Amino acid sequence: MSAWLLAALRPQRAAPRGFGLLRHVRALASSAPDVTSAFERVITPDVAEHLGAKGYAVVDSVFGREVARQLRAEVVRLYEGGHMHKNCTHLVKDNATSLVEKSHIHEAELTLDSGVQAAAPLCSALNSDRTLATMLSLFLPQLTLDSQAIKLQYNAGGGGCFPMHYDSDEQLDGRRVTAIFYLNPDWQEAHGGQLRLYPFPGAPLDVAPLEDRLVLFASTRMAHRVMPAAAPRCCFTIWLSQSRRRAFVRQAPSLAALEPASPDDVAAAARFLMHPAVRQHVSKLAYAAEWARSLEESHEDSATRAAMLDQHHKEVEIIRRSLAKYLPVVEQLARGEVKLPMQWF
């Protein structure tokens, strides 16, 4: 437990036994962000509709400036107090896993670490509230979000960033919505650290990490990265999941049912390429060069980084060979020349 929290919990000399702790608890209760009313206010049918139709949504002025800065102060204290660990990319090769540190990126697991919860009581108020999941499930009935996990992050600047990735795979777990809340007052474009979204087959877009801004996107179907940050950058991420045993309201059709009789049928080929089981591979192929560049920017030069890049290029080549007959359609998708309704959830 950090020194500042111990000091806050220490009773005053002249007070009755336990009075100092009671006063501290009351102070936390009065200053804790009212997350229930905040999410009830900002998660509207329009926000949910945009998330469902475009795969992402941006909401500003969620908690207000005062609460946003209190939350930022907790994240900074965790970093300065040594409660955070370096974020690492997991490189799996020859049945062995190597950890490749990302430069300047520090994180703390709020949901899993009681020590972090004690040191960050305002952030912990978010951990115990399920209003965000409830509101999204209400307005997007194809989602049945019933659990969440929160990670706090401090990017020390100096070029700290994340490579292109998806937050999960639908075959692995029930993660469906990623919610990132930004805590960066006085952010300027020169500070960098933008969230870049790739709503493939749409054009990429950058979202500034502004104070009190919430960004929602589809965890398994939205590739994204964090651009290099020149200044310290704070945020926390809430991953919203549904139990794997719960069936989707709208099941994705099987790959066999979607595979076109001829690759010359552009519309049918596009539907096949956008199937959840294929889509992540197609976007890695379409953005192969930028994906590689993001890996280089996110990790210091090392033999492990070289192995990671080599693995990326090999995967891209396998995807290219496997989808060879559809490459013209992939290129048309990348240029935005094929219009088709997207199912983001």
Image (spheres, rainbow, N blue to C red):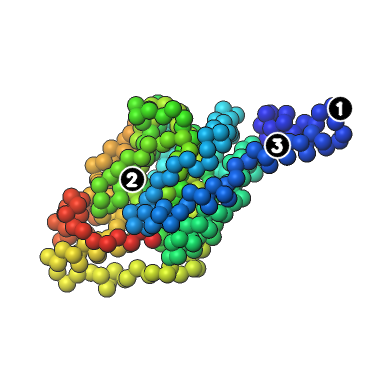
Residue annotated with mark 1: 14
Q: Position of residue 197 (x, y in %)?
A: 33, 45
Q: Position of residue 231 (x, y in %)?
A: 42, 26
Residue 256 in the figure: left or right of residue 25: left
The mark nearer the N terminus, 1 or 3, is 1
- What is the CA distance from the residue labelled 3 to the residue labelled 2? 39 Å
Decide: marks 3, 2 in contact (CB < 8 A)? Answer: no
Quadrant assignment for the N terminus? top right
Residue 34 in the figure: left or right of residue 340: right
- Is 213 above or below relative to 331? above
Identify the secondary structure beneath mark 2.
Answer: strand
Q: Amino acid at mark 3?
A: Ala
Q: Residue furthest left?
A: 264
The mark nearer the N terminus, 1 or 2, is 1
- Residue 155 found in image quarter: top left
Residue annotated with mark 3: 27
Residue annotated with mark 2: 197
